[in-house]
Image: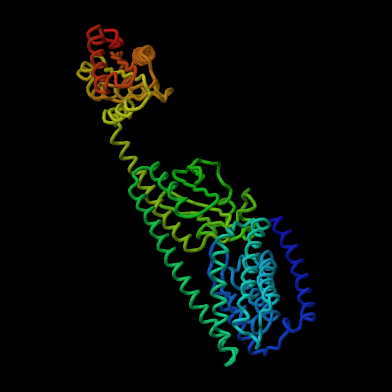
Amino acid sequence: MVYYQKVARISWITLALIVVLLFLASFAFPVHMNPAISLGNASYLLILVLLFQFDNIRRGGIYYTFQEGIILFIFLNYGLLIAIILSQLGVLIFQLFSHKKEIRIKRFIYLYPVNVLFDIVYITVPASAYLLLGGPTGPGFTYTESLIPFVGYLVGVFLISYLQCRFVNRFLNLKYDWTRLIRLQTLVYGISILSALLGIWFYDENPLVAATVSTLILFLFKQLLQQRGVSLQATHNAKRFDDAKERLLVSRFERETIESLLIDLPHLIDFSDGWLSIQQQRKQIIYDIRTKKTVDVLPLFHTLSADDLRTPILYGLRFDWGNDVQLSLPVDRHSMLAIPSITSGEVDVSIVLFHQIADAYDEAKADEMSRLLRTFCRVLERSQENFQLYAESRTDALTELPNSRAFYEEGARQFASEHFPLSIILFDIDHFKYVNDTYGHKVGDLVLRELGRRIKYVIHRNDSVFAARYGGEEFVVLIADCLQDQAIAIAEEIRHTVLDRPFIVDDHHLSITVSLGVDTVEHPYQRTFEESLRQADHALYVGGKHNGRNCTAHYANL
């Protein structure tokens, strides 16, 4: 803010000097600077200027008012000073009443002198080029004598447009593409000159009729341009957002839903920096939308009042933000769109976007983003239910270990990967039927549950180990990047975890043992997953059960 305060001070001082120079010029060049005009005509022309000012077209953060045509008409018929005065009155009234109340004063302090200076330069430089080339004005205007001066006029416009882009990029840190600006200025000034020339055609009948004709021509072109641009853009944006919603709706799980939104956001709306906050089950995760990586908590939403959290927050320039936004961002970040809180059930989503371009966001974009985030919230809430159902369908209810279905899915995935060597350990409880027959199935279930707890204790230290209940009293372990000796060591650890401490269930102290069979696949295509599982099963019964039980056998050692 300190930087922009300095720019504003310099702008106000420069504006004061320009006003003094124009005042002095009005005495030095009275022919071109101070022609006679009635108060009624001036008032009517000012109304036309204001009409264009408030009915503007915004492209890339720049307001195109199309007032250039009526200002050119005023210059050609009433002189440069009247054109400047009426244009400046239009800028002043527009600056005071066009913006929202909360940013109106800030915009006036920081932008009014810059807008005034640009407006004066846009009028005086092309008009001076026109006059220096002998361009006719007033009653002596002729079309043939004005052709070459109008070329000079357009050259002046394009030169000022280029210098304006360089200025705002360098001093105001606003990102404007000067080639795009030149193209738009060509269209605007081309139509403006045409309307002014057609208006002069009617000047002899009545000056106000001529001004009205120019105004009608400009309005016709402007409305056609505006409706075409708005219609095409609205249709295109709506389709993109609808497609993104459809991709969200087909997402099944949380990770898939979040990735879908993070991938789509850069294609849906332009931004320089953006963050997405997802809060669910009292846990908040914030993603940098550009990198799709998690970041530390941003302080933005914690500084906003409760009223601010109800509706989207839109700012168009850096000095609009105020003290509520406490973020360390580059000085060229101007536009901000913040949607602080979209909720569905226990899911709360917030998003904040910043852009280098001024006035990059509007209420239409905020509404589209809000609707997208509501869809995202509902899908994210549904994905939690889907994940719970998915987890339950792959979890053994008794031991809370994955079931055989989950094991087969994991086995197929691991054998299709490059995590070789892979080892499978298959084991079951020795004489489990005796436990059920002697103590009852309830005690047997408690033994299975305790065994599942002990298996989880063994494997929790190693992320590459996947254990499941295979069925009945059988359990299975799949280990990635595991050599034969390592697999045997893990199998022995499981065996001793069961053997070394009795199972205390329903006041019964039971000595439980297990027999284990192991198989190791050294490299891909050596054996399939099903073949390795059969070999582990063979090792269990041939090397374990038939060898006295309570032991570990590897298929390679049979």
Please provide percent x and percent y for residue 257.
39, 45
Please provide percent x and percent y for residue 25.
77, 77
| Residue in the foreground of this view, choosing between 123 and 91 | 123
Please provide percent x and percent y for residue 461.
44, 22
Against 462, is 308 above or below? below
| Residue in the foreground of this view, choosing between 374 and 247 | 247
Quadrant of the rendering where the C terminus is positioned: top left
- Which residue appears at 26% of the width and 24% of the height? 470
- Which residue appears at 51% of the width and 45% of the height? 290
Against 551, is 420 above or below? below
- Which residue appears at 24% of the width and 23% of the height? 530
Q: Residue furthest bottom?
A: 205
Give the quadrant of residue 383: top left
Quadrant of the rendering where the N terminus is positioned: bottom right
| Residue in the foreground of this view, choosing between 32 and 365 | 32
Please provide percent x and percent y for residue 556.
29, 10
- Residue 455 lies left or right of residue 130; in this view the side is left
- Residue 66 lies left or right of residue 423; in this view the side is right
- Which residue appears at 63% of the width and 50% of the height? 330
- Residue 264 lies left or right of residue 192; in this view the side is left
Residue 497 appears in the picture as rendered: no
Give the quadrant of residue 190: bottom right
Residue 449 appears in the picture as rendered: yes
